Every structure is written in C-alpha cells, then in structure tokens.
Image (cartoon, rainbow, N blue to C red):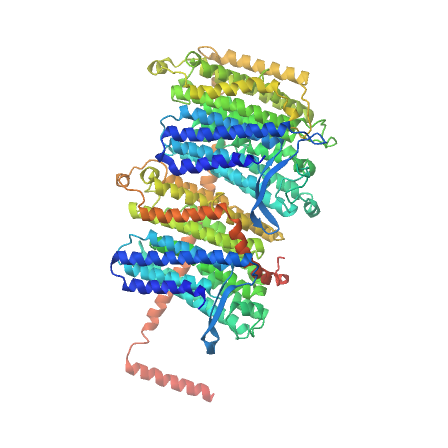
C-alpha cells in the first residue's frame, strides 16, 4: 500500500507546478496536466480499493485497518501532531468518491471553462482542493483532519471567488470562509478538549488490529476524561459536530452554501455537492465509535438538527428560481439525510432506544456515495444548461429537451435517483435511511418520508421547469441552445451510468458497516413500497403543476399564499439575520467602539501625558530665566530656609 | 574571539563600508555583501547548533564566552545562544537580508538611511547573542534610537509625531526596564549581571527575595512589554508602523517587537519565577485582551498599515499570552509565533510598501482590483493574508496550534477560558483579512491612474519570494525548528515551573 502516498503527492505537485507556471503554460497544456494527474490518482485509488477490499477479512469479519504511513509532523510535548495515511473501509470508499468526481470535473472543465481567463489557476486550485480533500479522508488523527479541513476551506474560498471581479463572487467566497471558520473554531476547541483528556489525537479508539499486528499510534485513553466528568467527551464531540455542521451546511450554519454557487459550476459539483460538504458527515462517521461509547444521548442532537435542516432546505428549494440554488438547497437537505442516518444508528444501545441494528451508519455512507454521483451529475448537467442559455434563472429555460438530449436524459436519471425511484441508486440508499429512521422513532421516520416526497416534488419542478414547461422562445430564437461538447457530456454519461447501476449491482453493506463486518442489505418491503408510492405521487403532482406550457396551479398557489412564497423564496430571511448580526452587532457595536476607544482613550491618555509634560515644562521654563538677581534671590531664600530647617 | 561576536562585527564593518562608500551602487554592494554574510552566518549557526545538539551537547547555552568589560560594575560582555536565540538570529538575518532588497530604490539619502538601518540591525543581533543583562540593555537601546531618525526622516504621513511618540513610549519602557534590571542585579546580591548566574544562583548570586521580585517583575515585564505591544501600551505601534518606511516597518514589526517577547521571557520570567507565578495572571488577562482587541480593531481600519499594525498587536499578544501560560508546549509555540509573525508581518509590510510606492495611497477605500494590475504583488498579498489567518502549510498555523494545544494543557477553568477567548481570534482574523483582500485586490479598478501601474521589479520580487519561502518552509516542515526551540525553552520553563506553588490559579 506504499503507493497511497502518491495519491496525495501527485495532486500537490500538480498544484505547485500549475500554480508556479501559471500563464507560462497554455490552457490546453495546463488542463491536460491537471487531468492526467487526476487520472493517475483515480487509477491509484481504484487499485487501492481493489487491493483493500479483496484482501482477506480478519477473524471477526472486519477489514484490517492499514496505516502505510504515519510520522510526527509537529511534536507538542506529550502530544504530537502526526501526518499519515490510514486506510479503512470508509476512507477507501471516500478515495473512490473523491477521485471519481474530481476526475469527471477535471474532464468537464475542459469544455466548461474553455477560453476562460485564469484557466491555469483554475486547474491549480482544483488540484489543491483534491489533494486537501484526499488528505482529509485518509487522516490518521483528528488534528491532521483539521489541517486538511482548513485547506479544503481555503481551496473552496479560492474557487468560489474564482471570478474575482464580480462583487457577488467576492462576497460569497468571504461568507463561505468566515462562516465555516466560525464553525471550525468550535471544532478546534473540541479537538483541544479531546486531545487534552485522552492524551492522543489519533483515531485509534477501538484498538483495531493492524496488518502487522502493532498499533502505530498512542492509543486514545479515555480514563482521564471519564474521571474528569461524564460531560467532557460529549462536549468535545458536540463541539466537533458544530465544526462538521458548518462544513456540511447544517441549519443554522448553512447560509454560505447557496451563495457559494457563485463559483464556476464544475466547482459547485465537486466541492459544494459531492465532496467537501460531506466532510462533516465523514467526521461524525470517523468519530462514530466515540459517539457510541461516550455520547449516545447526544446523538439525538445530530438527529434533530439533521431532521430540521432536511425539512427546511427542502421547503426553501420548492420556491427558488435559480437552478443552482435549487440544487444547493437540495444538497443541504440530502446531507441532512446522511446526518440523520448516522445519528439514528446506535449499535449496542438497544436499551436506550428501540433500535435493532446498525443500519444507519451503513445507510449514511451509502447515501453519501450515491448522492455524490447523482448530485455531481445534476450539477454538471446544470452547468451544460447554463453553458447553453448563459443564465441560472429558470425563466430563461423551458423546453430545452429538444436542444440538449444527452443532458436531458442524464438529468432525468439523476432526478429519478434523488427522488428515490427504483432501480436507481438513490432509491436503495434513501430507503435504508428511512428504514433506520423508522426504527429510531416513527415521528422521525415519517418526517423524513415527507421530506423525501418534497425532494421528489422540487426536483421534478426543476426538471420540468428546465426541460418542459414554458419555453422562453424569444431568447432561444436569438441564441439557439445547443448540446455541450463531448468533454462535458462524457462525465454526465459516466456518472449517470454509475447512478443506474450502483444501487443494485453492489452490495454496499459488505464493504462499509457500523461494525465493520459483512452486512447484508435487505429491503423492508413496507417502507420501500410506501416511500416509492409517495415519491411517485409527488412526481405526479409536479408533472401536473409544471409539465405543461402554462402553470396555472403554481401561479394560483403563489397568489393564494404570497407571504409563504416570499418567505421561502427569501430563504426565511436567514441571510438577513446574519447580516444583522455581523454588520449591526459585530462591526457597529464591537469593532467600531473598540477602535474608537483605542484612538481616543488609550492613545489619548498617552498623548495627554506628552501634552502634560510639555505644558508643565513650559510653566517651569520661566524659572531658568538667566536673570542673575532672581537667581541670587532664590539662592538666598533657599539658604535661609535650610538654615531654619536645620535649626529647628 | 568567540564566533558569535561576528554577528555584531559584520554590521560594524558594514557601517565602516557604508561610511566609505561613494555612490548608490557601492552602498548597495556593501549592504548586499553584509546582509548575505549575516544570513550565511545565521544559517551556519543553526546547522552547527543542531549538530551540537544532535551530538548530545545538552548545555543550556552553547558557544558561551565572557570578557570583563566594566569590571568594577561587574559588567561583562557575555555571549551565548540557546535554541530560542538561534531561531531569533535566523529570523533577524532573513529580515535584514530581505529588507535590504525591499529598500533597493529608496530615495533620498540612501547612504544615511542604510547607515541607520545597519546600526539598528547591530543592536538586534547584539541583543540576541548577549547573556549579560547590561549588554542586552545596551544593545536594546542601540536598536531603538535609530528608529527615531528612520521614521522622522524617511517616513511618510505624520512622521514627526509618530517618530516622537514611538521613541518616547519605548524610552518610557526602557526607564522601567532599567529600574527592573538594577533591581534584579542588586536583589540577586550584586555579584553578576549574567543571566545564567542569576537564574541558577551561581557565581555569587543568591535567590531574589519574593517580595522584591514582586516589585521588579512588573517593571521589567512592562518595560519589555511596551515593545511587545502589550495592551494598553501598544498605541505607538499603529502610528509608528504607519509612518515608517517599508524596510523599517519590516525590521521593526518583524524583529524589534520580538525583542519584547524575548526579553519578557528571558529576563522577567526566567530570573523571577516566583513573581511570574504570582503575578503572571494579571498580564495574562492583559494579553488576552490584546489578542481579541487588536483583531477587532483591525476589522474597521481603513489604512493598510493600520490594519497590519493592529493585527500585529493581536499576534504579538498571542506571543506574550503563550509565554505566560508557563508550560513547555506553549513556550515553544510562543517562539514559533515570534518567528512566524516576524516573517509574515515583514512580508505584509514589504508588500504594503510596494503597493504604496505605486498607488501613493494606503486607504483601502481608494484601492480596488489590484489583482489585474499587479498580479505578482496581489498573489503574494493573498499568500501573506492566508499565512496571517493560519492557513495550514504556512507558518501561522503551526505557531497558533502549538500555542493553543499548550495553553489548553494548563489545568483550571481560568486558563481554559482564556484559551477559548484567544481561539476566537482565528475567526476575527479571517474577517479582517478577507475584507481587506476582497476590497483591494478583487473587484474592478476604477481609478485610471492605477491602471497604468506596473508589477514588482526584480529586487522586490526577490525580497518577497525569500520571505514566502521562509513562511512556507516553517509551515511545511516545522518539526526540526520546533525541536530546536524546545531545547531552549525547556530549561527556562523548568525554572519557572519550580515555583508553581505560588500560582494562585494552579
């Protein structure tokens, strides 16, 4: 497994090379370098996965955790900050997800970014992002994860702000970075608490058996934490979860993600749909053994934040008119599904909740995988559409199915997948999630089923709005939409093929499960039937409302509930709330007074000292007048005074 | 002749050379030769020091030497270095080297400018190699005085006011410091000015009584703290930096401010461990205020240099914050932060100077879209900004993380709370850095005068690239320097921790 180092090293070198050469390279060459490197990385990732999953399982049915590299990067006294590579089922799965989607995006960008100024810089940043994301998933310890976590944040910042002359892009990139940084502060404090009380940053919780029989890390020792009080580890984990919630856009830290759509569309597909935004989910999955062992009650925080976010984002998605924003809210909602699924999974805590299996963990990871593929496909499809009509607004679209057949079909497949229609991949993963939720609590299960129905509805609203519905004939006559070049459609086809097959062709549970052992997925017929029936019904409603040339029902609804529509369209004014907090409270009521205080009170005090000294010296200057009579008089006076003092 | 003295000798020779030099090219030649020699010497020292340590030499100070200087007053010229001083010497050499290139085209009075600049560097190098309190103090003063002229003559804006303010405030600090030093000297029995003697009660020194320490510790700490931008004695910094010429800002923020932290640690805390434990908490609160206060102030500034000056208040606050945490990891983090802040703030000031030299304004409201006009400078500015906000792979991250992990390992709610307060600065830093970058570099330039500006010249590029390489080098491979610093902070922290029983929060 020594070649895994190359998976990290190659994109880094590619970043350095492309970044340093920049405009000295032609567009074509830099794109080719970036894409070739990613091709190699993807091949190495597949090879790693093949090697890893075909190796013999251990005696307890799990896959061995491999640590091909681990070295101290920064010694911190008793603790140390390590860097390394750790391979276990979820990190290997993530390697596949990231390298696949990234490769698709690299190929796609050839067409999408064609002739764009800063093409080389774009590929350099893509390489940087890919390296950071890969580093994040193979981290051997929580600090390494945090390091790469920050790096993906910066790559995301740089890529959102790629069109740096556009004010909206600048504002969006800034917002994305600051909101996630705010969440990361909690993550950092969580890490500090965790490291201090367990004397280790490593992910070595369950003392897994390593391939060569020895553990390369200082193991996590929870004795001190437990002795210090039962709240310590749950606090640390919840703080880390806040960090994860920031990256994964959970309510109320989701506000950066819709704005992040200002970046180039392939970037949205890669970072803000498939990979970076699931980092929070991945973090929970990574710390899962700790959650289960020490903070099972606090898992309900994850669940209910997830449930609310899923519902909220789905509600907002129903009213948006910008196709990328619909997809962005859909992403938020789907990531919330993954969070919920993790939260409802509590193996070993049958007494605590009415739960029977470790289904949720596997379901969450499965959904992460399938979602990455179909959501990337949707975003890239959206990119083709934007490329064709030069706008994000649905009003400029409609009837595009005639002009862009490949985009149309792949988009439809992905929509069916996200809506949960068999045999597409989304059906299988979503069904597992719903089953897990039902077992956790029926309320949770039914809410999530309802959200799934909303998902089907808004996705088909989007689909019909783009490909059917009212065609903007005037616009299309002036500029006939055309199908995208093959570099852009090829990734769509590949991703939709994965979406069609990966649900039924692969038994995901045998690779990834909460216990690590082979887990046989079996559909719960009643839940599967219910969810499919509801999804189909939602699609039919959407068809009835939006598929025709004119949409009287939708207009009617909008007129009947204007306030609801406006609130949903304005995303329930969450952005305004933040605007108020940052500008009115932090800038106007903290920073400005502090700056004023500094200039006027503190600085004023020192200026006053100087001024006072100056004035005082002016006053006593008169004493040294050079007048001899005056000196003689003072001299005499002093002598007399001294004499009196000495005599008395 | 001890080879550490060469650090002082080279600037002396440079002064002579500059005095004799005729014409700008000769001046530049002397400066380049001298600063290159200093850099080479610093690198050699680092390598040799690491080799000595690897060979098992565990003495607290290496390359020590001592000569009588003013025998009746027990003043000696004593030199020696440990891990901290080696790191600081390396930092100073890098900044002097790059500062030379950053002021390549300085006009007018180039020769005089470099004379003062070299004198300032001599003070800095002398300070870091000295282990005698009096010699340290003398070099400290040598470093301060040229600032007055450098700002007053070659500065910009309200330069006379700024020069006067800076000098007076630092002189005020020196007055405190001198009282403190004499207090320590007589408190320890008046036998030696050597720091090691006083710390280890050798050479006729006795432990300083705790009551006396409580008088001299605040004086010494505040004396050095003024230079280290300790709240509320930091107000010279925004005005001073704003008016200083580029290379002086670089050297001042990059190195001189480190003299403060270094002195606080090496003299105030090391020699008076009991008082440090007893009174440290007061200063710890002040430094926590510095960290957050500086960052918040930076958010609403409109002058590029003011932003950076307040950011320095915040980052230097973190240095003092970390040393006052009084444990091994935090102290190592403090020195890493000195290095990191020195490098990145020098980079920042260099870039600001270059931008100002072209646009003749530092008001961020008047600047926009520089990325299109001067891409090289703009990209470097983004890198400097990212280093400042703690991007992994650059130096800031390493230093901050070491400090936070170190501070968090102190027992007690007091320390934990302060650490969490300090952690908030990473968010506020992001706010002002991104605001700045978004305003001046991104967007579209509307000022037609700015559209015709050119990108960096070769000397500017060279200075900037050297600094970026240093910042990235520290950020990518921190382990060796962290180990080296650890060998220096270790013995000092051991001494300080021996009096931990007096700490009210322990």
Q: Is residue A312 visible?
A: no
Relative to residue A609, is residue B463 depicted above or below? above
Which quadrant of the view contains residue A299? top right
State left or right for residue A491 relative to residue A288.
left
Residue A152 percent across, percent down from the top left: 50, 36
Residue A623 percent across, percent down from the top left: 33, 76
Pick the front one: A80 or A162: A80
Pick the front one: B267 or B96: B96
State left or right for residue B138 relative to residue A278.
left
Tell me which residue sits at (60%, 38%) in the image: A68
Instruction: Tell which residue pokes out farthest to the left in this image.
Output: B23
Q: Is residue B383 visible?
A: yes
State left or right for residue B456 relative to residue A204.
left
Residue B332 percent across, percent down from the top left: 54, 54
Instruction: Tell which residue pokes out farthest to the right in this image.
Output: A351
* Quadrant of the snapshot with the N terminus of chain A: top right
Residue B123 percent across, percent down from the top left: 40, 63
Which quadrant of the view contains residue B446? top left
Pick the front one: A509 or B44: B44
């Amino acid at each position: 497994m020594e070649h895994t180092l190359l998976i990290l090293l190659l994109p880094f070198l590619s970043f350095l090379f492309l970044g340093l050469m920049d405009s000295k390279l032609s567009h074509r060459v830099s794109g080719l370098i970036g894409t070739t490197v990613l091709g190699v990385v993807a091949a190495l990732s597949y090879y790693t996965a093949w090697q890893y999953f075909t190796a013999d399982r251990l005696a307890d049915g799990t896959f061995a955790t491999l640590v091909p590299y681990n070295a101290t990067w920064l010694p911190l006294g008793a603790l140390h900050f390590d860097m390394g590579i750790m391979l276990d089922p979820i990190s290997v799965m993530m390697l596949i997800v990231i390298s696949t989607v990234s490769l698709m995006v690299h190929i796609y960008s050839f067409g999408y970014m064609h002739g764009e100024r800063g093409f080389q810089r774009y590929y350099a940043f893509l390489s940087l992002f890919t390296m950071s994301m890969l580093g994040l998933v193979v981290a051997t310890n929580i600090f390494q994860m945090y390091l790469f976590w920050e790096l993906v944040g910066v790559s995301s910042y740089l890529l959102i702000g790629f069109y740096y002359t556009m004010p909206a892009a600048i504002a969006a990139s800034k917002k994305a970075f600051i909101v996630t940084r705010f969440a990361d502060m909690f993550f950092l404090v969580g890490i500090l608490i965790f490291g201090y009380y367990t004397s280790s940053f490593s992910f070595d919780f369950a003392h897994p058996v390593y391939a060569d029989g020895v553990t390369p890390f200082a193991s996590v020792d929870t004795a001190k934490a437990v002795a210090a009080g039962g709240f310590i580890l749950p606090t640390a984990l919840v703080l880390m979860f806040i960090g994860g919630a920031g990256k994964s856009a959970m309510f109320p830290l989701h506000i950066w993600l819709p704005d992040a759509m200002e970046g180039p569309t392939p970037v949205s597909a890669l970072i803000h749909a498939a990979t970076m935004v699931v980092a929070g989910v991945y973090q929970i999955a990574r710390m899962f053994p700790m959650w289960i062992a020490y903070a099972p009650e606090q898992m309900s925080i994850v669940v209910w934040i997830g449930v609310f976010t899923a519902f909220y984002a789905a509600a907002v998605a129903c009213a948006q008119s910008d196709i990328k924003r619909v997809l962005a809210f859909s992403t938020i909602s789907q990531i919330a599904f993954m969070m919920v699924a993790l939260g409802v999974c509590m193996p070993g805590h049958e007494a605590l909740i009415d739960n029977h299996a470790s289904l949720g963990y596997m379901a969450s990871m499965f959904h992460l995988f399938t979602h990455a593929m179909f959501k990337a496909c949707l975003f890239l499809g959206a990119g083709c559409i934007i490329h064709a009509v030069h706008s994000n607004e649905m009003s400029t679209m409609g009837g595009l199915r005639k002009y862009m057949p490949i985009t149309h079909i792949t988009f439809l497949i992905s929509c069916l997948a996200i809506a949960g229609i068999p045999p597409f991949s989304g059906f299988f993963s979503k069904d597992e999630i719903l089953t897990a939720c039902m077992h956790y609590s029926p309320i949770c299960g039914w809410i999530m089923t309802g959200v799934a129905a909303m998902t089907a509805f808004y996705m088909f609203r989007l689909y019909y709005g783009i490909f059917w519905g009212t065609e903007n004939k005037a616009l299309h006559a002036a500029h006939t939409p055309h199908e995208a070049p093959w570099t852009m459609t090829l990734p769509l086809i590949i991703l939709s093929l994965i979406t069609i097959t990966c649900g039924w062709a692969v038994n995901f549970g045998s690779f990834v499960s909460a216990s690590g052992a082979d887990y046989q997925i079996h559909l719960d017929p009643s839940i599967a039937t219910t969810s499919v029936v509801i999804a189909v019904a939602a699609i039919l409603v959407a068809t009835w409302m939006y598929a025709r040339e004119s949409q009287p029902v939708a207009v009617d609804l909008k007129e009947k509930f204007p306030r609801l529509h406006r609130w949903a369209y304005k995303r329930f004014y969450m952005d305004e709330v933040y605007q108020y907090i940052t500008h009115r409270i932090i800038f106007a009521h903290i920073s400005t007074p502090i700056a004023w205080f500094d200039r006027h009170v503190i600085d004023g005090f020192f200026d006053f000292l100087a001024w006072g000294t100056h004035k005082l010296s002016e006053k006593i200057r008169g004493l040294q007048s050079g007048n001899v009579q005056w000196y003689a008089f003072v001299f005499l006076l002093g002598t007399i005074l001294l004499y009196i003092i000495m005599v008395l | 002749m001890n080879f550490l003295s060469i650090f002082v000798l080279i600037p002396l020779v440079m002064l002579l050379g500059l005095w004799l030099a005729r014409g700008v090219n000769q001046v530049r030649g002397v400066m380049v030769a001298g600063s290159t020699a200093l850099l080479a010497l610093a690198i050699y020292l680092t390598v040799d020091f690491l080799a000595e340590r690897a060979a098992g030499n565990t003495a607290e100070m290496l390359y020590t030497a001592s000569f009588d200087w003013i025998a009746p007053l027990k003043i000696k010229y004593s030199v020696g270095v440990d891990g901290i001083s080696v790191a600081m010497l390396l930092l100073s050499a890098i900044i002097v080297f790059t500062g030379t290139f950053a002021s390549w085209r300085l006009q007018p009075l180039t020769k005089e400018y470099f004379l003062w600049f070299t004198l300032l560097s001599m003070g800095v190098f002398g300070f870091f190699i000295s282990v005698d309190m009096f010699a340290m103090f003398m070099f400290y003063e040598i470093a301060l005085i040229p600032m007055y002229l450098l700002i007053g003559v070659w500065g910009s804006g309200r330069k006379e006011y700024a020069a006067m303010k800076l000098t007076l405030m630092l002189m005020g600090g020196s007055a405190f410091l001198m009282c403190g030093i004499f207090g320590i000297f007589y408190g320890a029995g008046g036998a030696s000015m050597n720091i090691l003697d006083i710390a280890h009660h050798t050479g006729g020194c006795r432990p300083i009584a705790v009551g006396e320490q409580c008088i001299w510790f605040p004086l010494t700490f505040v004396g050095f703290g003024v230079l280290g931008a300790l709240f509320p004695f930091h107000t010279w910094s925004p005005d001073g930096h704003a008016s200083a010429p580029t290379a002086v800002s670089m050297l001042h923020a990059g190195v001189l401010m480190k003299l403060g932290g270094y002195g606080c640690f090496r003299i105030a805390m090391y020699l008076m461990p009991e008082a440090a434990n007893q009174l440290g908490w007061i200063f710890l609160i002040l430094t926590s205020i510095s960290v957050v206060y500086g960052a918040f102030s930076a958010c609403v500034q409109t002058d590029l240099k003011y932003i950076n000056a307040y950011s320095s208040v915040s980052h230097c606050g973190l240095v003092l914050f970390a040393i006052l945490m009084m444990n091994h990891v935090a102290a190592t983090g403090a020195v890493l932060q000195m290095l990191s802040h020195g490098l990145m703030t020098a980079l920042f000031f260099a870039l600001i100077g270059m931008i100002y030299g072209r646009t003749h304004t530092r008001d961020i409201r008047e600047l926009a879209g520089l990325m299109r006009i001067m891409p090289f400078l703009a990209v470097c500015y983004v890198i400097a900004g990212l280093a400042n906000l703690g991007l992994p792979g650059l130096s800031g991250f390493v230093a901050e993380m070491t400090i936070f992990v170190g501070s968090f390992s102190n027992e007690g709610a007091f320390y934990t709370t302060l650490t969490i307060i300090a952690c908030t600065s990473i968010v506020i830093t992001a706010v002002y850095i991104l605001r700045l970058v978004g305003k001046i570099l991104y967007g579209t330039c509307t000022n037609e005068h700015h559209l015709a500006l050119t990108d960096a010249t070769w000397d500017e590029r060279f200075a900037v690239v050297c600094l970026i390489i240093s910042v990235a080098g520290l950020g990518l491979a921190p382990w060796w320097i962290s180990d080296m610093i650890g060998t220096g902070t270790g013995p000092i922290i051991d001494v300080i921790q021996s009096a931990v029983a007096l700490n009210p929060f322990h």
